[in-house]
Image (spheres, helix red, strand yellow):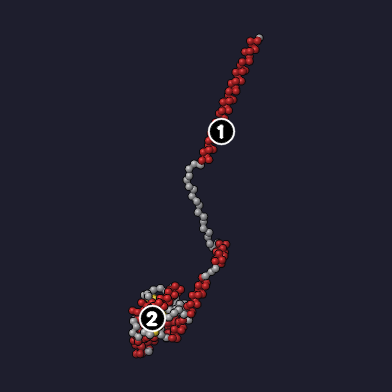
Amino acid sequence: MKITRQKHAKKYMSFYKYNFRFREPFQVLLDGTFCQAALRNKIQIREQLPGYLAGAIQLCTTRCVLKELESLGKELYGAKLIAQRFQVRNCSHFKDPVSGSACLLSMIEESNPHHYFVATQDQDLAMKVKKKAGVPLLFIIQNTMVLDKPSAKSLAFVQAMQANQLVPEHQKQSIEHLKEEQGLVKKPEKRRKRKRTSGPNPLSCLKKKKKVQETQQPSTTKKKRKRKRNRAKSEAKAVPIQLSMEA
């Protein structure tokens, strides 16, 4: 029985850690009814509760709870002594104290921003706590402390939160497209490729050879022209000599 109770507590704790961001040390608000039940059943809250919740805890109460225990007289004197050992958290009823249950409800507010656990034996207070999402509830049954399963309000809140997070793929693409059109998303800049140093281009070498050949061609043509001119001069000189001999 103890093993299954530990398994359930571990499962419920993971639910509150993952969905409502509960972290150590866990803050537990206790009222007079829970302290009285722990005294009757000989439960050491400070020693047993950290092992059950598998983490460090901070036990706390309020001034309104302490004043309520004082007003109830000797019957709850032992419960008052237990509650006085815990940290006293400031509430908004400093001048006008209210009942312990009303004070604890005001501490968790609407969304339990301080991540309080509520430990109580008051059935009316327990029902009101279950109507708020993200508030773990502790009570005592058969000489053992029990962490109640997540309420229907907490489960509905988590389902609604998950439904808002799940968006179809085509809607994601359309949203991204609209963001780009409005200029809300910067496009990643393309990286320029660095030019790698390479050897000489073989084609450029071939072109250079052609140029050399082209430069060599005019020199040969010049030599041919000089030869022709020399022949013409020699022929011109030979003609007048022949005429003089005939005369």
For image coordinates 33% across by 84% down, the residue present is 42
According to the image, label 1 marks what residue?
Answer: 214
According to the image, label 2 marks what residue?
Answer: 1
Mark 1 burial class by Cα count in 10 Å: few <14, some 14-19, many 20+: few
Q: Say above or below: 50 vs 195.
A: below
Mark 2 burial class by Cα count in 10 Å: few <14, some 14-19, many 20+: few
Q: Quadrant of residue 181?
A: bottom right
Q: Position of residue 238 (x, y in %)?
A: 61, 15
Q: Which mark is residue 82?
A: none
Q: Secondary structure at mark 1?
A: helix
Tag 1: residue type? Glu
Q: Nearer the viewer, residue 30 or 241?
A: 241
Q: Quadrant of residue 63?
A: bottom left
Tag 2: residue type? Met
Locate residue 102 relative to residue 235 in the image: left or right.
Answer: left
Q: Nearer the viewer, residue 2 or 169?
A: 2
Please tell me whether mark 2 or mark 1 is closer to you in this view.
Answer: 2
Q: Nearer the viewer, residue 195 or 88?
A: 195
Q: Position of residue 9 (x, y in %)?
A: 40, 77
- Taking the image as drawn, is residue 100 in sight? no
Q: Say above or below: 188 vs 225.
A: below
For image coordinates 55% across by 35% down, the residue present is 210
Asked whether the beta carbons under mark 2 and mark 1 sit within 8 Å of each other, the answer is no
Q: Secondary structure at mark 2?
A: loop
- Taking the image as drawn, is residue 53 in sight? yes
For image coordinates 36% across by 77% down, the residue present is 51
Q: Residue furthest top?
A: 247
